[in-house]
Amino acid sequence: MLTVGYGDINATNEIEALFIIFSMLISCAVFAYTLNFIGSIISDITNNKKQFQQEMIIINKFLERKGISRSLKFQIRKYLEFNRLTEKEISKDESKIFFQKLNSHLKEKVQQEINETLIKNSEKIFSQYPSEIQQSISNKFQDQYHQRDEIIFEEGELETNPSIYLIEQGSIQIFYESLKGKQTQVILKTLNKGEYFGQLEFYTEQPKIASAQACEFTQLKKISKQDFLNSILESEKGEINEKITFSPLK
């Protein structure tokens, strides 16, 4: 193909000429297909690389926003880079892209650090407890999501197992219904990221004295009273077992 027109091969009769013509047509088609196929492969590699870079930008922003430690971020990046070499399909759902790509061990470590950071930044509501109990509490948190104007709980509601709510993202309003004249909502306060609510009913187990409503898309972490008490008991049992294990024999 690359020496066509050089005159190094000459037909001596019509049959050879026709054969050469058909051979050249087939060769041209194969050559064009090969070049197009190679170009397509290069294009796919480039697109996959760009897509991976976009995913890493999303993941890095997520890790920075959640306050993940540098060492864990390094582990995550290395894992994803290795995973990219062995995995061809890449998820396009940005809301799930992060946790979908982690193995269970890294996923658990990230979730634990997120919860521990949230505890430390939530106006020290759990600061009276030792770090062992705080870590146990962080493992008991449950995620809860609310759309704008969605009611989280209502005034007068009585929970058999009340919860404390921590705001991981978004904001909420605490309000009650005024019955004076025309019924209206009276906003008591607006809470933002890092703040908490529901603690009064959590400790007293009384009905809600006000309602809570999401002002925007809001992500909450909550822990029920039963899970909270279990965390304390588990930590105390672990401490007792440790003392028994390492106490010197007399």
Image: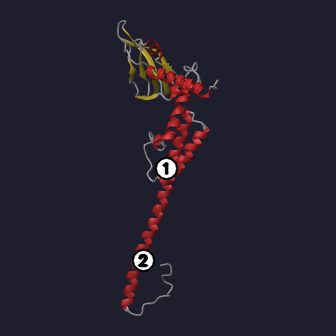
How many marks are shown on the rendered structure?
A: 2
User: Label for residue 27?
Assistant: 2
What type is the residue that disc 2 sits on?
Ser
Q: Position of residue 177 (x, y in %)?
A: 38, 12
Can see residue 218? no
Q: Position of residue 233 (x, y in %)?
A: 50, 22
Name the outermost residue toward the top.
Answer: 180
Give the mark nearest the N terminus, 1 or 2. 2
Name the outermost residue toward the left.
Answer: 182
Q: Secondary structure under badge 1? A: helix
Name the outermost residue toward the front.
Answer: 250
**Label 2 crowd bin: few (<14), some (14–19), many (20+), radius 10 Å:** few
User: Label for residue 51?
Assistant: 1
**Label 1 crowd bin: few (<14), some (14–19), many (20+), radius 10 Å:** some
Residue at 56% in and 23% down: 240
What type is the residue that disc 1 sits on?
Gln
Left or right of 36? Residue 120 is right
